[in-house]
Image (cartoon, rainbow, N blue to C red):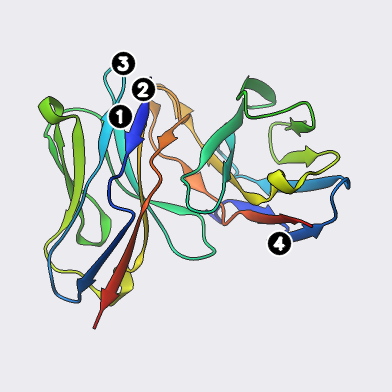
Amino acid sequence: AQSVTQPDIHITVSEGASLELRCNYSYGATPYLFWYVQSPGQGLQLLLKYFSGDTLVQGIKGFEAEFKRSQSSFNLRKPSVHWSDAAEYFCAVGARGTDKLIFGTGTRLQVFP
Amino acid sequence: DTGVSQDPRHKITKRGQNVTFRCDPISEHNRLYWYRQTLGQGPEFLTYFQNEAQLEKSRLLSDRFSAERPKGSFSTLEIQRTEQGDSAMYLCASSFLGGTGVEKLFFGSGTQLSVL
């Protein structure tokens, strides 16, 4: 079955600290992987995506993610978190040619000053 | 690029009533998607259109749900005889399917439905 698992429901970090949000997927075909961010009451904004090639992808707002096929993971990282990064983060998987994405349950990030 | 617009932002209705939501995608986008998001969950795919054709419907979409995209531009999602379990955020997204495949989904801010 195709699925995405985000094992951390809620993460709290101090401003300036590093961040890693975990994502594991189960997908039959070659996966296309995405990270989205959602602020309260807002739609989802794409942070970054992986289709092929370099397994370390750079996104907006200083985020990056690394695709590890052997671990079926696509973890999101940021070296120094800003208070404005507080939001809900969703990992998603899909196939080429479709936006019918399967989303994880999300990780809520809280940032303390 | 004015983004994906959804109307209304919030809808409160009584159980058994019908509701209709509207989505205006980015103008040059040929694909339009509807997702549903309940509290504490990620978005779940409901249905999508390529131009005016509805190409796929999720099993989540019961007979009470119907979606249209009559001229390949805006779309409506109607829920008949609403139930409390229909309470959720309904998200619309659009994208452009080109020769290299779909690149990016743009989401609207959603319509929050509360069924009392």
Q: Amino acid at mark 2?
A: Arg
Q: CA distance from mark 3 to mark 1?
A: 11 Å
Chain letter belonging to callout 2: A
Total labels drawn = 4
Other-residue count near label 4 (Cα within 10 Å), few / some / many at <14 / 14–19 / ≥20: some
On whether disc 3 and disc 4 are found on a single subunit, the reply is: no
Return the x and y of residue B39 as percentages of the image width and height: 54, 53
Frontmost residue, B63 versus A62:
B63
Residue A90 left/right relative to A66: right
Residue receiving disc 3 = A28
Q: CA distance from mark 1 to mark 2?
A: 7 Å
Chain letter belonging to callout 3: A
Q: Residue at x 34, y 34 (%)?
A: A4
- Residue B31 appears in the rendering: no
Residue B98, compared with residue B95, is above or below; it is above
Q: Which mark is residue B10?
A: 4
Looking at the image, tell me whether mark 3 or mark 2 is earlier in sequence order.
3
Q: Which mark is residue B72?
A: none
Frontmost residue, A34 versus B61:
B61
Frontmost residue, B72 versus B59:
B59
Return the x and y of residue A96 as percentages of the image width and height: 36, 22
Residue B38 left/right relative to B40: right
Return the x and y of residue B59 as percentages of the image width and height: 62, 23
Q: Residue at x 60, y 32 (%)?
A: B46
* Dot 2: element: loop
Residue receiving disc 2 = A96
Residue receiving disc 1 = A32
Q: CA distance from mark 4 to mark 1?
A: 32 Å
